[in-house]
Structure formats: structure tokens, C-alpha cells
Amino acid sequence: MLWYKSWLETRWRFLVGLVLMACSAAEVVLVYPKVRALVPLVPSDVPGELGRQIHEAAALAGSYGGYVWSHGFRENLSQLGTLFAVLLGTAGLLSRSAGALFTLSLPVSRLRLLGVRFTTAVAELFALAFTSALLIPLLSPAIGARYGVGSALAHGACLFVASSVFLSLALFLTVLFDDPWKPLLGAIAAAIGLALVDPLLGAPSWSVFAVMRGETYFRAHRLPWGGLLLSAAVSAALFFAAAATLRRRDF
Amino acid sequence: MAESIVEVAGLHKAYGGVEALRGLDLQVPAGAICGLLGRNGAGKTTALKILLGATRPDGGAAHVFGLSAAEPAASVEIRRRTGFVSEEKDLYPVMTVAEIVRFTAAFFPLWRHDLQERYLRRFDLPPERKVRALSRGMRTKLALLLALCRGAELLVLDEPTSDLDPASVEEVLQALVSHVASEELTVLFSTHQIADVEQIADHVAIVDRGRTVVAGPLDDLRSSFCRVRIVFDGEAPAATFDVPGAGRVRREGRVLSVLSRDGADPVVAQARALGPSSVEVLPLTLKEIFLESVAGEG
């Protein structure tokens, strides 16, 4: 029944996330013919950084795979994945408004409460990442294009594992604070902060956003194992920190 | 004497620099209905949360069914055998009445489905209504149903009648009394409503500033606490009473009024030596016992 409770507490966030990420993936695919038609019109004489970025975007849009990666996995799905990982991580658990004392009066250990809550959110995040990623090969024939299922799965895995870091961070913050807004805002602020710091560090391949974007897979056709393992380890560490904090917390 | 279901000794708890409990002691015998009486902020809720494992004590010991409430595994076992209603009556707002009943029943193998049906009817709880749409009174009744149907050996109720209208208070207390009369269980409830304690409790513990100041069977307290009224022909002398149990002495004109916590006899014997015109022993109400106990602290 704890699973059912977790589902009730997260279902709207999950379903909204599923619809938005599916729509985003569909939009990436269905808009491609218009983008392809615009590529020859892109000016090639714009100087400086702006020109370099325009040139790079046009070059990526020249191939369907490059376009899907740059618009889908690098931008829209990474941003939505981060947002919904935070939203799933902050839903419910043990805040007063969510019946914390009633939950704590049940004959269930705190670790189990947290474990069920975490597992539910991780399963939902898994569904968000892979559903949106797999929609791309599924919808591509509609515009006469082809996108490999293997590539979609690889990008889905990168999106899922890296965004689970933000889910765990949000979960950890909900254990620290009773207030529902502090964990939400704290996790979003951390994500924005990391996104700003990432380019300053040269966007290393092991960073959480580099892993989420799947750039290594797109450019070198290999999974960023080091980054995936690091993200998974950070996510697990945040979960165990949440468990240790929850064990000691007074309600 | 019946074994104690709840045994608390020297319990300490501080939040930041504020001491909520300062050596609280409490014993609740099996089968008792014990009212934990105290002002707001006296430490009642903190004590009950510690018994349920929701809060960890800084010092002292709290045992329920002989199990340590501070031990996580033992705490799970305590909760398996305990029904609890929190002060906030905080339930899951996203569930309907039927869902939260089904949800709670799944955790308790001894869940009383017969009582569930009876209390759903008695409290007139609409099964399909969301918890968030229930009135405060309805939520209290639902929380009570969820506690009573667990097949528990102990009920822990934190301010079960707070914020209820008089009719709902009566309904909740009557349900509690009839439930206890038909089931073998122990009840520990906190309140600052003296009338609630007088109506249903047979034991009482008065808590003030984190300590137990008076505890025992209600009948014993009523027989041991009394006021000795000593009337003189002239102005009452400024006497002190140096006998066991003697408490506050009030002097008003020709009358000395002495509170005794340990029967009237020692005080009466000393009063007679003062040559009064009359000595009268008056029983104390629970309200007077409470006010005297709390006033004497700090």
C-alpha cells in the first residue's frame, strides 16, 4: 500500500511530465522538415561567437541525427528531465501537510518509507526518459526520416541516470526541510548553478549535464561510462544521506 | 498492581535551546485510561511523539510494552500494537475516506473490519469524499476510526477533542468510552480539557514545564488532595504547616486555607494545635488539583 500512496502523491507530476516530454519529443521530430528547409537560408557571414554558434547549429541541423541531438536531447529533453526529476523528488514524503505523523504511526521503518518513495520516483523518471527518447524513432517515419532505436535508448539512459542526481538531491532536501518550497527551489537553484558552472569548467564529459546531454554518445558513439557511474554514485550517495538524515530527524 | 504498558523515566528533550521535557516520569498501567493533563507547551505532545518513535529523546528512557521507544526496530513493533491520533489529525489529503481506511488496514493484521463498518456508520463518514474535503470534526472522527480499528492494545491520542464543537466532543468521547468498555486496551490521551479527563479517565498525570507534577489513579488523587479550612475567632495567625503533603497556605481575615496532597489528617492535627473555632476538610475538584499543582511549579 505504500507504493499506492507514493503513486497517488506523484501521479500528477509524473503524468504532466510524461505529456510534456512526449510533446516535446514529438515537436522535435515533426518540426524537422521546416528546419531543414531553413538551413540553406542561414547566413554564413556573421562574425564572432554568434556566427560560430549559428554555423554550428546549421551544421547540426544538416543531418537528422545532429538535429535530434541538438534540439531534443541537448536542449528540450535535458531541461524538462531536470525539472521533472526535481518535481518527482519533492512530491509527498514526510511533510506535515502530507500526513507525516500519521505515516510515522504505521508499523513501517523510516528507511522503507524513503525507499518506496525513492523507487517510485526513480521508476517514473525512467518512464519519462525512455518514453520521450523512444518516441523519436517511433515518430521519425512520419516525416520520412529514420532514427535508430539503439541511439534513442542510449540517450534515454544518459537522460535518466544524470537527471536521477537531481531527483535524489530534491529527495534529500525534502528530508532536511518540512517546508514544501525550500526543497523545490533549492534543487532548482542547484541545477541552474551547475548549468552555469558547467561551461566555465569546459563542460567536462563526466559532468552531470554533459552526461544528460549524451554528447559523448552523439560525437563518439560510445556511452560515457565514467560520467554515468559518477552520476549514479552521486545519486546513491544523496539517497543514503537522505536515509541517514531521516533516521535521526525529529517530527 | 497491573503491569505498566507505558513506562517513562527521566525523559529529557530540547529543541534548540528550549527544553520541552525536563525529566518527565509516567506510568500507565494495563487497562487504564490515563489522561495526560497540562497547559499548552507543557511537553505532552513531545512525550507522546517519543513513545511513537517520531521524536528521539535526549535523555531518559521510554518503554511501551517493555520495548524501548528509542530503538527503531522496537518502535516498529510498538506501532504495530498501538493506535495513534495526532494533534493535527493530519491524514492524506489526496486519498478518499475509503482509500485511507483500506490503506491503513493493510498494515495491521488484526484490523477490525466489523468496527470499521460500525464507526463509518456511527460517524457518518462518506467513503468517497476526499480527506481534504472533510471538516475538522469529520477528520478527527476518521483519525479516531483509523486508530480504533487497528486491533491495538494501546491507544495514544494527542488532544483528541481539540477544536471540536461540544456535540462532536461528546460524540468522540462516547465512542472512546464505549470502545474501551468492549475491548481490552489501554488508553493514554493528552488534553488541556479537564472535563475530558473527568469524563473518561481513571488515571491522570499532570505535566507542567516538562515534568510530571502529579500522577496516579484519579480516585486516589481525589481522596488524597483536599483543602483544610481553619476558621479562627479573631485574625488568623501567620502559621506554616510543616507536615508531609502540606502545600500552599492562604490567609484571609479569620480563615487559613491549607492545601494537602497527602490526606487531611496531618494538617488537621497541626491546625487543632492553633486553637481554631472550626476546622473543615473540603474535597478538591480535578480543576483545583490541576491549578494548585501547576501554580506550585516554577
Image: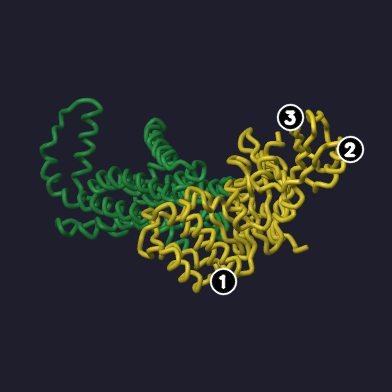
Q: Position of residue B187 (x, y in %)?
A: 62, 59
* Pick the front one: B247 or B127: B247
* Callout 3 secondary element: loop
Q: Position of residue A158 (x, y in %)?
A: 38, 50
Which of pointers 1 and 3 indicates the residue nearer the eye? 3
Q: Which mark is residue B273?
A: 2
Q: Which residue is mark 1?
A: B110
Amino acid type at circle 3 is Gly
Amino acid type at circle 2 is Ala
* Pick the front one: B290 or B76: B290
Q: Which chain is green in the rendering?
A: A
Q: At 74% from the left edge and 33% from the top edge, which residue is drawn?
A: B250
For the residues labelled 2 and 1, the Cα–Cα distance comes to 63 Å
Amino acid type at circle 1 is Leu
Q: Which mark is residue B253?
A: 3
Which of pointers 2 and 1 indicates the residue nearer the eye? 2
Look at the numbered discs 2 and 1 and tell me whether their residues touch, using CB distance below 8 Å: no
Please tell me if label 2 and label 1 are on a single chain: yes
Tell me the subunit letter for badge 2.
B
Q: At 68% from the left edge and 50% from the top edge, which residue is drawn?
A: B205
